[in-house]
Amino acid sequence: MWEKPSVQHSKSYRVPDAFEGKNVLLIGSGTSSTDIAKEISPYAKSIWQTSRGGDFDFPATVLPANAKRIGDVASFDLPAADGDILSGSDTGSDTGSSSGSDASEPSGAIPGTITLKSGHKLCDIDHVIVATGYHVTLPFLRSHHRDDLRPEEADDKVIVTDGSQYHNLHKDIWYIPDPSLVFIGVPYFTATYSLFEFQAKFVAAVLSGGATLPSEEEMRKEYQDRVQAKGYGKKFNSLKFVEIEYVNEILGWINKQLVERGRQPIAPHTPAFVAAKEGAYERIKNLLGGGRGSQPAPRVPDEWFPAC
């Protein structure tokens, strides 16, 4: 019997040797999927990585030798008795995520076949790792959730709709209707801890009276301008290639007020950090083909796919 640990989200991945001799299908071609492919490569028998040609996909050239980039999945074609496992039935054994322990390792190849949108079929897949990203959620602020709405349907109060982005935050920090509600760590594609430290300093400057936020009307206008420029969805909270500009823009008005009020200004990024970050930007842009982000959907040869 196929067990539920045969399918897991990348967040529960722990160690590569759990995939010794396995045929592994990775759903998604972003950072997590590519990192996992590289880690399990010395252990796995074969690795298949799907791609929709999305903005966050890495090129197939970064994959290890035993990994193949293929197109998106059209369907998982399971026998009826096993299909209820995917639907949440208790039919299969639920022994936890596959983290490398004997108790959580898959018990054999997943029954049935996996059909790609190209029409090709995969069989004898032992393990599927879903690495398609995350939805944001604020379980401690359910009053600010509207999970039934699409992002473009958000009003001027909601913070989370379908989980693809945060809404109504000034500079991804201050909740516009009530700026005493603040968020540290919303943006991504950043030098994580460095940016979060800057955000914490910005918040401390405002809460301590060293700087004053713009009026609600001004914050709302800036937010709407950003919506018009970036659109809704996952890209909205991305600081890809603009992290330094983001920090400097906020530093500009906060430091001006700090100095006017006799406070010490917040130090900007060091020249060494800026040089290293700009070098990293160039490497990423070269890797992604001029920084366009999206990769063409792969065209794969028929001989890659054995008869199922």
Image: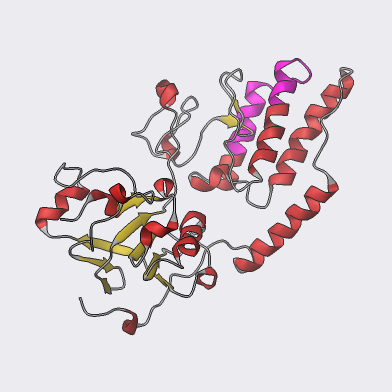
Quarter-of-image position of residue 67: bottom left
Q: Is the magenta region chiefly helix, strand or loop?
A: helix
Which residues, given as a range, are shown in magenta? Answer: 202-225
Q: Who's the residue at 56% across and 20% down the image?
A: 177
Task: Looking at the picture, tell me which residue is in the foreground, 243 or 93.
Answer: 93
Outermost residue, front direction? 102
Q: Who's the residue at 60% across and 29% down the image?
A: 220
Q: Who's the residue at 85% across and 48% down the image?
A: 271
| On screen, residue 93 above or below 288 | above
Quarter-of-image position of residue 2: bottom left
Outermost residue, left direction? 81
Quarter-of-image position of residue 113: bottom left
Relative side of 250 to 30, left or right:
right
Residue 33 is situated, as x and y percent measured from the top left of the image, at 46, 58
Residue 273 is situated, as x and y percent measured from the top left of the image, at 78, 48
Task: Looking at the picture, tell me which residue is in the foreground, 24 or 304.
Answer: 24
Counting every numbered tag in the picture gives 0
Outermost residue, top direction? 209
Residue 185 is situated, as x and y percent measured from the top left of the image, at 59, 35
How was the colour assigned to the protein in this rendering?
Answer: secondary structure
Q: Quadrant of the C terminus?
A: bottom left
Relative side of 263 to 53, left or right:
right
| On screen, residue 48 above or below 183 | below
Relative side of 260 to 141, left or right:
right
Q: Magenta span has 160?
A: no
Q: Quadrant of the N terminus?
A: bottom left
Q: Magenta span has 223?
A: yes
| On screen, residue 201 above or below 18 | above
Q: Who's the residue at 42% across and 36% down the image?
A: 153
